[in-house]
Structure formats: structure tokens, C-alpha cells
Image (cartoon, helix red, strand yellow):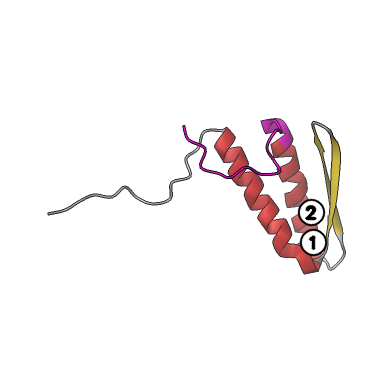
Amino acid sequence: MANCFNDSVWDGMTLDQLQAALIALQQAYLQLLGGSKAVSASYAQGDGARSVTYTQANQGDLVQGILGLQKKIADLQGYTCNRRAPLAPFF
């Protein structure tokens, strides 16, 4: 199956690590929506732990991180990324 996603910062992580990171980012997003305070998310990667802090100002970056993780997990699980219906010629 062809890889339909670009290389990303999530490459090299196991499925379990990706899912744990996704949960951390989603929890951070929920906390961010609940108030105006900064929120931190941490996850472990092969070469050490990572941590990032989000504020209301970069809420979009947090959403993009969640979407990127969801795509990477779907890719590893073998889901296709085709969103268009196949072309059907008609005469």
C-alpha cells in the first residue's frame, strides 16, 4: 500500500506511542477550550521525552497536531486516505 501522507515529526514512533501522544494532545485541547490558561502536553519518543505548551493564541497549531497524529495512526493501521469516489466514465 502506498504511503499517502508526507513524512512528519511522528515518523519513527510506534503505534502505541502515537496513540498516547494523541490522547495527550486531545486532553490539552479540551483543557485549552475550557479556559484561557496555557496547557502543556508531554509524550515519550524513541530518543527522549518531548513537551510542548499551547496557549489560546496557537490553538490552531494544536488542532493541526491532532489532525496530523490521527492521519499518521490511520496510515499505520492501513486505512486509505482516498476521499474521492472512483471515476466512472459514462457514455
Residue at 77% x, 51% y is: 27
Q: Is residue 36 left or right of residue 75?
A: right
Q: Which residue is mark 2?
A: 28
Residue at 16% x, 53% y is: 90
**Is the C-beta separation of discs 2 and 1 under 8 Å?**
yes
Residue at 73% x, 51% y is: 26
Q: Is residue 86 left or right of residue 71?
A: left
Q: Nearer the viewer, residue 42 or 8?
A: 8
Residue at 51% x, 42% y is: 4
- Residue type, mark 1 in image: Leu
Q: Main secondary structure of the magenta part?
A: loop
Indicate yes or no whether the magenta region holds residue 3: yes
Residue farthest to the front, as pictured: 7
- Residue type, mark 2 in image: Ala
Quote the CA–CA distance across marks 2 and 1: 6 Å
Q: Which residue is mark 1?
A: 32
Q: Position of residue 2 (x, y in %)?
A: 48, 35
Q: Is residue 88 left or right of residue 81?
A: left
Q: Which residues are magenta?
A: 1-17
| Residue 35 figure quarter | bottom right
Quadrant of the image containing the C terminus: bottom left
Q: Position of residue 28 (x, y in %)?
A: 79, 54
**Disc assigned to residue 68:** none
Question: How many marks overall?
Answer: 2
Q: Secondary structure at mark 2?
A: helix
Q: Position of residue 43 (x, y in %)?
A: 81, 40
Mark 1 surroundings within 10 Å by alpha-carbon count, few (fewer than 14), some (14 through 19), many (20 or more)? some
Q: Nearer the viewer, residue 28 or 59?
A: 59
Mark 2 surroundings within 10 Å by alpha-carbon count, few (fewer than 14), some (14 through 19), many (20 or more)? many
Q: Position of residue 58 (x, y in %)?
A: 77, 64
Image height check: is 89 above or below 7? Answer: below
| Residue 57 figure quarter | bottom right
